[in-house]
Amino acid sequence: MSSRDALRWNARYHDPAARNADRPPALLLEEMASLPSQGLAPDVAMGLGAGARLLMARGLRVVGVDIAEVGARVARQRASGLMAVVADLERFDLPPGCLDVIVNFRYTQRSLWPRFRKWLRPGGWLLIESFNPAQRALRPNADPGYFLQPGELGTAFQDWRIVRCYDSAPARPDCAGIVAIATDS
Ligand SMILES: C[S@@+](CC[C@H](N)C(=O)[O-])C[C@H]1O[C@@H](n2cnc3c(N)ncnc32)[C@H](O)[C@@H]1O
C-alpha cells in the first residue's frame, strides 16, 4: 500500500497545478501564536511544506516527513534549512521525549497516535486536523477508514490537556481536529 501511495503522491507533486495549490493548514495559522517558538517539530506527512515553512517562521527547527520524494524535494527547494526526510510513516519511529511540537494535517494513520505520545516531551503540543465523513460527498471513492469519526480524537487523547477538539470546524465542516498538550503521564 505504501509504495502505491508514494507513486500516487509523486505523480501528483509533478503536476504544476498541485504545486501551486500548496497552502498553509488553516488550523496551524489559527494556533501559530500559541505554539512554542523553539525546539524540534516534525510535520508528519508534510506534503509540499507549506505547514513546515510556517513552523520554521515561528522559530522551530522542522523535520518534514513524507513518503513522496518529489514533494520532499520541492519542500526543500522552498525552505532552506528545512530537514526533509523521505520515509514511510508506517515504519517510522523516534526516541522518546525528543519533540516539542507535532503537526499532522490531512493524513490519518491511527497507529501513529501512541507514537505521538511517546515522542513529545511533557508540555509539547500536538495539532491534528483531517477529514471527517462529510468529505465523502466530495470524494465518494475515498477509503472511509481515512475519515475521523465523531468523538474519535477526543477519546484517543482524553488524558491530554485539550486546548481545542472538534468533530467539525465552522470554517471547515469536513474537518475534525485537535490541539492538545502532552502531560506527564
Ligand atoms: C493530503 S496530503 C497532506 C499534505 C500536507 N500535510 C497538507 O496538509 O497539505 C497527504 C500526504 O501524506 C503522504 N503520505 C501518504 N502515505 C504516507 C506514508 N505511508 N508515509 C509517509 N507519508 C505518506 C503523501 O505523500 C502526501 O504528501
Image (cartoon, helix red, strand yellow):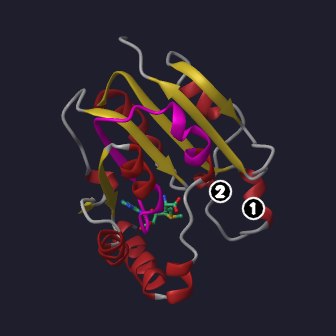
Picture coordinates of residue 141, whole percent (x, y): 68, 71
Residue 157, placed above or below residue 2: above
In terms of depth relative to the viewer, which is nearer, 59 or 113? Answer: 59
Residue linked to disc 2: 144
Q: Nearer the viewer, mark 2 or mark 1?
A: 1
Q: Amino acid at mark 1?
A: Arg
Asked if marks 2 and 1 touch (Cβ < 8 Å), the reply is yes
Residue located at (28% from left, 35% from top): 39
Residue for point 49% across, 80% down: 19
Query: Is residue 169 found left or right of 57 in the rendered image?
Result: right
User: Label 1: few (<14), some or many (≥20) within 10 Å?
Assistant: some
Viewer-nearest residue: 35 or 180 = 35
Task: Say which quadrant the N terminus sits in.
Answer: bottom left
* Mark seen at residue 136: 1
Give the x, y percent position of residue 178: 59, 34
Which residue is at a point 26% across and 52% down the rendered structure image? 91
Residue at 72% of width from left, 38% of height from top? Answer: 167
